[in-house]
Amino acid sequence: QINPNHTMKKIQLIVLLTLSFVLQAQTNTLKESYSFSLNEAIDYALKNNYSAINAGRDIDAAKKKKWETTTIGLPQINASLGYQNNIELQKSLIPAEFFGGTKGEFAEVAFGTRHNMLGSATVSQLLFNGSYLVGLQSAKVYLQISENAKIKTNQEIREMVVNAYGNVLLANESIAILEKNKLNLEKTLNETNQIFKNGLIEEENVEQLQITLTTIKSAQENIKRQKVIATNMLKLILGITIDKELVLTENLNNLSLNNINFELTTTPFQVENSIDFKIQENLVQSKKLLLLLEKSNALPSLGAAYNIGYNAFGNQFQFFTNNQKWLNFANVGVSLNVPIFSSLGRSARTQQAKIALEQAKTQMLQVEQSLKLQFEKAKSDYEYSLEQLNTTKSSLALAERIENKQQIKLKEGLSSSFDLSEAQRQLYSTQQNYLQAMLDVINKKATLEKIVTKN
């Protein structure tokens, strides 16, 4: 005899186990996460950032474009098959006397057959064309432009990752410091409240601390919201969907120390190594080729072709039977095209290309001077960030001592909470300045490296 209760328990157990596996699978999916150091984040972004992916595709497209241009000078083979059904044959008039008719009269005669079919194949070869030779060089330059654009994109992505990564670390440190400040302030508030209850200080001292505590709590919540935005921004740059979890393994203090590099500020700047300078060189080269192209349009072009085919005729459609007779033909030809006079149109286009080339050269000088100025500014900013890091670190130690002294004085009744609040505001501001100084060292170094790096 089957026990209904026992069967029901087995069913419930199976259901619970099934739900457990489903929930576990969902939890594993939801918990999919990424963990990166700064260098790991940069490497990941260079492969998965949306702009980096498309920049790589631009290079692939440029390679295909280069091959497309090359094939213009290679043999071309084309085949065609045509069929014509003359529903009503075209008629012509010829003197009737040819057929024994009356002189001066004309007879209608239809020439041709009702069904015609033609099959042919043509092999053509470009023997000489100045524009084609320029096109080959242009395709190479176009590929170089795409490759340099990819390098430029990678540099910008690297800088964006550094900035975004640092912003998340800044938010983390800010939240931690605010939490520490909140706990210290709550402790001070409780002690001050006890002193007030003992009648040793005024109630205003307690209220002032309560105001400061409320301000800290509000700032902490705001920083938490900013952290979410900063983290999502970093995910976007990395090429990660924002629903995935992201963990950063660096901390702001160690990262800022690792980014102290005085050698960067002493190494001479080689403007030729800058990717912006190389891109401008590509622009000048492309303008030179456009000028060469206009000049090449005045040169003759030479080509050859070999044509072979078969045609067939009949009043009945029997082209695919053994009875159908096919007539073959073949020819070879050479064509020479010589430009003679264009009413000075080619000359005008050539002069325009010369002007564009001179403009590109002038722009190149501007880019060179601009890059040197950018380097000097980036170097100055980086040196200043290093100085600020030391300055704010010293100021923070002083602000901590001042705030600690004011807490002791408040407990001993030698100062008011207003004096303590002022010391606390100074401390909180100095803390943020120190965090920002660490972040500036990281960001300013990234900006300087983007200018001086070769690729």
Image (cartoon, helix red, strand yellow):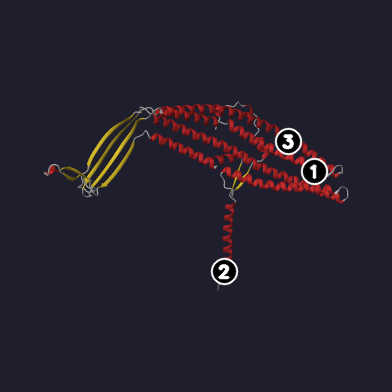
Where does the image place residue 330, in percent across and percent down from the top left? 25, 37
Q: Nearer the viewer, mark 2 or mark 3?
A: 3
Residue beneath the point at 28% across and 41% down: 120
Q: Which mark is residue 7?
A: 2
Where does the image place residue 218, in percent across and percent down from the top left? 72, 48
Q: Residues within 10 Å of mark 1 (few under 14, many from 20)?
A: some
Marks 2 and 3 sit apart, C-alpha to C-alpha, by: 71 Å
Q: Nearer the viewer, mark 2 or mark 1?
A: 1
Indicate the amino acid at tag 3: Lys
Marks 3 and 1 sit apart, C-alpha to C-alpha, by: 21 Å
Task: Name the image quarter holding the C terminus.
Answer: top right
> Which residue position holds label 1?
421
Mark 2 vs 1, N-terminal side: 2
Mark 2 vs 3, N-terminal side: 2
Query: Are the residues tagged 2 and 3 within 8 Å (C-beta)?
Result: no
Seen in the image, is 413 located left or right of residue 315? right
Where does the image place residue 377, in percent across and percent down from the top left? 63, 30
Q: Quadrant of residue 96?
A: top left
Asked whether 329 or 235 is in front, the reply is 329
